[in-house]
Amino acid sequence: MSASTGKTGEDYGEEFVGTEAALFDPFADDEDFDDGENVVAEAVKYEPHAEQADHTTGSLRRDAPDNPGTSAVAFDPFADDDEDEDDEELAGVGDIAGLIKDLGALRDHRTGRDGASRREDTAERARREALSTFRSRHGAERSSRPVADGMVELPFIAPARAEDALMDPHSEAKKPGIAMPQLNPGDIVAEQYEILGVIGHGGMGWIYLAHDHFVADRLVVLKGMQAEKTDEEMAAARAEREFLAGITHPQIVKIFNFIDDERVAGGFIVMEFVGGPSLRARRNAQDNHLLPIDVAIGYILEILPALDYLHSRGVVYNDLKPDNIIVTEDQVKLIDLGAVSGIGAYGYIYGTKGFQAPDVSTHGPSVATDIYTVGRTLATLTLDMPREDGIYLPGLPSPTTDPTLRRFLSYYRLLLRATHPDPEQRFSSLAELETQLYGVLREVIALRDGRYHPQQHSLFSPQRSTFGTKHVVFRTDQLIDGIDRTIRMTSDEVVSAIPTPLIDRSDVGAAMLSGSSYAEPQEALETLRQAMQTPEYEESAEIPFGVVRAMLDLGLTSQARAWLQSLSERLGTDWRYQWYSGVTSMFLEDYQAAQSHFNQVLTILPGEPAPKLALAAVDELILQTRELQNTPLLDERVARATPALDGNLADLAREIFENFPGDDLWSHVTDDPKLLRFHAMRLYGMVWASNPTTVSSAFGLSRLLVAEGLTEMAVQALDRVPQASRHHRMAKLTTVLMLISDVLTESRIRRAARRLEEIPTNEPRFIQIKTAVMSAALEFLQEAGVESAASHNTLFDYPFTQTGLRNGIANSLRRLARQAPSAQHRYALVDIANAVRPQTLF
């Protein structure tokens, strides 16, 4: 398909579904207004005369005294020097001057032309060469271009030839209700446009390709308009033509003219011809008839500014679908403006079944209905969507049945919100959708390709500190002071580490909050309370949330919860309300409530890592309260695929997920231990893959993998902590202890020893971890009932034998005794060293 409309029949068995109208009449239920007739707005004939007069006189006259206008300056390549100046410069140089003049005369004699004609021919030749170069470079192959902050490379698409865009109308005319075109090749419309043929059929009839003989024989598209029937419809049509004529955006097809023709009721819109395939054609050209998710998101991100431009002008596009997005050269363009209408307009609102929002007929066209079409377009480009009679059915496939959605669950959640049946539950604006698209795109690329891109679009701060990163290593401090330490997380530890919402700079109270951020919590709380009593800040949402933050900083957790409950009616749908409610519930150790609130945040913001990290921590805390933190809960196949380290959920059979407990496996609100472990591992893995600076997710994932008996995978997760990170040493020490905490083998013990030897000896816990490794080695030999290891290589410069290890452990314990904080523990360490030391005669 290579037309500006993208409506050219069937692709791999898919029937074309044209644009249709949905009736929206806000007065239908109003008995006072109902006059017994169903009045709808339709397009009418265009009356150009008044507008032509305006266009004629609307610009500045070029002959006005204060407007000199554009003028031409002659360029003659043979007249670089003035003749008089030449004579003066050549004077006195003798025969040289005469020779140059003779050569010039000889050149003129041989060409048989005088100087003036020669200059004219040179200018004409230069124009021809410039035009030839311009035409030859049109469509010349160029490199791909990066979009979406460099995350996606969109290929260069050579523009299609006009003859390739034409189609045989007989194939479409065989379908019910479609007659042959009224115009034929060679017909002239409005004494200007010569019909070349048809390029598609839509809701307004046949779409024609034509030559514009008034403007350099350029190619144009003639698309029908709805015929007017009543005075009201004529007025609506005039208004429609007025705002269509005013639309100018580089990513929206240009409208050149509105013309009437007696052969076609309603006349035509004359539009720019965009030679290139539609996104539907691009999708169908793929081997699996689907676009990669990152490429599809890249194209949608390119087209969102055009939709946002329309919304800013008070109109909505209404008919976004892959057919109406054309890719040509390095451009992405919206075509077919026939369905554009004002926000809230009523009457017949044109759209396409399977893409049009269901609320168009009840609430009218809106920004929310356009967002719905964006979500449906993304879904049909990337997923095998169910169809019936060539029409896409409502809803989305489940991740249980669709491997792509199982692998990229954030993408699934984004599509769920964009296409929610309730318009109030969709993204509130294209800007909000765009931010989440960037986040989902980063995650998709990270999970699929292992490539990390900095997070440039986020509503949260970076992680403020870490949680759960030191427990395993700090437990060895018992050798120093004798205090038993358990590996348990706390809610306070988690809350102090997870990101916080950034201040919305468009909020009226943003400046005040920025100024009070350095004040003491008590002082900030009093300032905010006073501000809320002034009319200037009564509409602010950030100030009430600032009060919550100040209360939590002061430890007034119960008061913060009560304050949030008072805000529920006004701000309950705001994601920040849900976030602070989740944080407050965590402080109160009401983990089920926290889980529900953070799940709401993730539903609203599927591209943000912060709610994923918070949910994973909450799920782990719930398991910890039930003493299940070290209990294996998952099938090994699921446990290995869930973190997306050496595989992914798409690799598993569908039947595995059908046997999971619960009604909705993919909802995060659950108290089932198996699902809690599954979601926590998946979310930690997702955050760690796309945000390698969020090391808490790496340590959390490693803890859960160890609980499932997958120590090697846990080590693999921590090995991804960047060497430049300040947490790299802690990650390496943790892997040493993990290797000796599972089933002991000589290989694991030696690997643990080698890892520890890579750590500088000035590490404060070097000796105690070395002691732990040698103790594990001695235990291994004793359990195996052997005196020495299979290999004769030493372990920390001690023979890998029971005798050698006993000497090593005794020496290390004596060194630790010198650091003991109390005499009692010092004596205890010496006693242990004496007991471990091998018996001798001296």
Image (spheres, grey):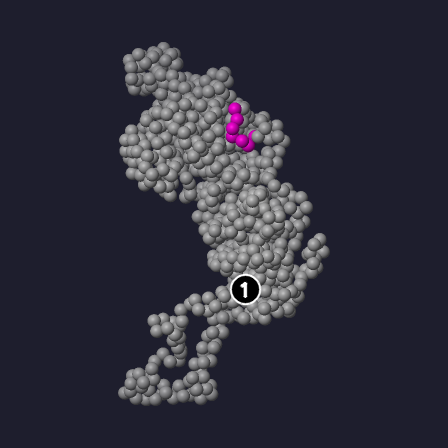
Q: Residue at x 44, y 23 (%)?
A: 590
Relative horizontal placement of residue 69, taking residue 657 as reference (left or right): left
Q: In which quarter of the image is the C terminus?
A: top left
Q: Magenta part of the protein: which range?
A: 665-671
Where's residue 347, x and y in %? 57, 50
Q: Nearer the viewer, residue 154 or 722?
A: 154
**Amino acid type, label 1:** Glu
Is 180 rendered above or below residue 358? Answer: below
Q: Nearer the viewer, residue 787 or 232?
A: 232
Would residue 296 be seen by someone viewing this image from the given angle?
Answer: no
Relative horizontal placement of residue 811, taking residue 441 as reference (left or right): left
Q: Residue at x 51, y 21 (%)?
A: 631
Q: In which quarter of the image is the N terminus?
A: bottom right
Q: Which residue is drawn at 36% across and 71% down?
A: 67
Number of residues whose C-alpha sits closer than 10 Å to that of mark 1, classed few (under 14), some (14–19) or many (20 or more): few
Q: Residue at x 58, y 26 (%)?
A: 661
Judge whether residue 667 is colored magenta. Answer: yes
Q: Quadrant of residue 541?
A: top left
Residue at far top of view? 841
Judge whether residue 711 is colored magenta. Answer: no
Would residue 539 be seen by someone viewing this image from the given angle?
Answer: yes
Where's residue 565, x and y in %? 42, 28
Q: Which of 759 and 94 is in front in this view?
A: 94
Residue position for label 1: 47
- SS state under label 1: loop
From the image, give the main secondary structure of the stretch colored magenta.
loop
Q: Nearer the viewer, residue 509 or 71?
A: 509
Is 310 rendered above or below residue 77? Answer: above
Where's residue 277, x and y in %? 58, 56
Where's residue 453, x and y in %? 44, 43
Relative horizontal placement of residue 316, taking residue 163 as reference (left or right): left
